[in-house]
Amino acid sequence: MPLLSILIPVFNEAATVKELLARLRAVELAVPREVLLIDDGSTDGTAAILAEAAAADPELRVITQPANRGKGAAVAAGIAASRGDWLLIQDADLEYAPSDIPRLLEPVLAGDADAVYGSRFVGGQRRRVNRFWHTQANRCLTTLCNAVTDLALTDMECCYKLLPGELARSWTLQEAGFGIEPEITCRLAREPRLAIFEVGIRYLGRGREEGKKIGWRDGVRAVWCVAKYGILRR
């Protein structure tokens, strides 16, 4: 059976990561899985929660970053340590529902897709009403990335990205922060025979007062990343 590696970058999510793991355990999948928890230098007790969870569940592995470097660095560490035929990125903050994972797997299990993106803007799924400017910035970045890569995504910045494991492990990812989203997308777009699908997913977005970490500087960096990895092809 093919193996699914679920990569969970975690930074100071002591309030949510235990519940996330409970929801993940409740999801029945058609393939075996491994879960890699990448602790990105947490200082709020997250490390102890992850260690306890891994001791109780053989599916879980914990990778510890010595200091906080950012989501991209954590994802890269997870990719390097993964063994799966497919890799799925999952945030630890409960914005995304693990119960959507079987829907993301469907196109690859059917042999139709090589990679699958979740989308918060298609499929009629319920989502929490988000901030106007955050949503518009997301759509602008997606449009810009589409123009450069000639893809037609609706949600390039979505956390849920299901990737072919062998291909992802061949990359030398450079972005330590949230620029990992356009970097991965631009690298996928370089593969001419790769079939990329989108699946509508649920989304319960949180605000900065609830712990959301992405900000306007990350948006500026994302524009640069589209140019760097899409136009300059670094």
Image (cartoon, helix red, strand yellow):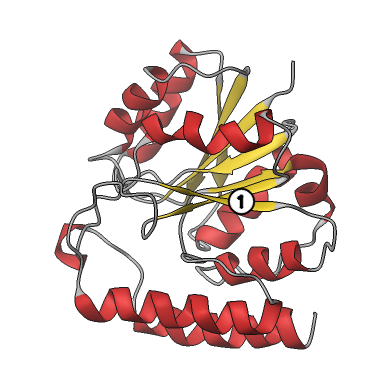
* In this picture, residue 192 sits left or right of residue 87: right
User: As shown in the figure, which amino acid type bears the numbered disc 1?
Assistant: Phe
Rendered location of residue 125, percent (x, y) = 30, 46
* In this picture, residue 208 sits left or right of residue 111: left
Q: The C terminus is located in which quarter?
A: bottom right
Q: Is residue 105 above or below residue 52?
A: below
Rendered location of residue 183, percent (x, y) = 65, 70
Q: How many marks?
A: 1
Name the one closer to the observer, 174 or 112.
112
Q: The N terminus is located in which quarter?
A: top right
Residue 158: in sight, yes or no?
A: yes
Instruction: Name the image quarter holding residue 16.
Output: top left
At 29% across and 43% down in the image, what residue appears?
94
Q: What crowding class fits label 1: few (fewer than 14 Cα within 10 Å), some (14-19), or many (20 or more)?
A: some
Q: Secondary structure at mark 1?
A: strand
Q: Is residue 174 above or below residue 160?
A: below
Residue 62: in sight, yes or no?
A: no
Q: Is residue 153 above or below residue 65?
A: below
Q: Is residue 130 above or below residue 234?
A: above
Residue indicated by mark 1? 197
Rendered location of residue 231, percent (x, y) = 74, 87
Instruction: Name the image quarter holding residue 158.
Output: bottom left
Rendered location of residue 160, percent (x, y) = 49, 49
At 72% across and 78% down in the image, what residue appears?
229
At 58% across and 32% down in the image, what residue appears?
106
At 36% across and 17% down in the image, what residue appears?
26
* In this picture, residue 148 sits left or right of residue 156: right
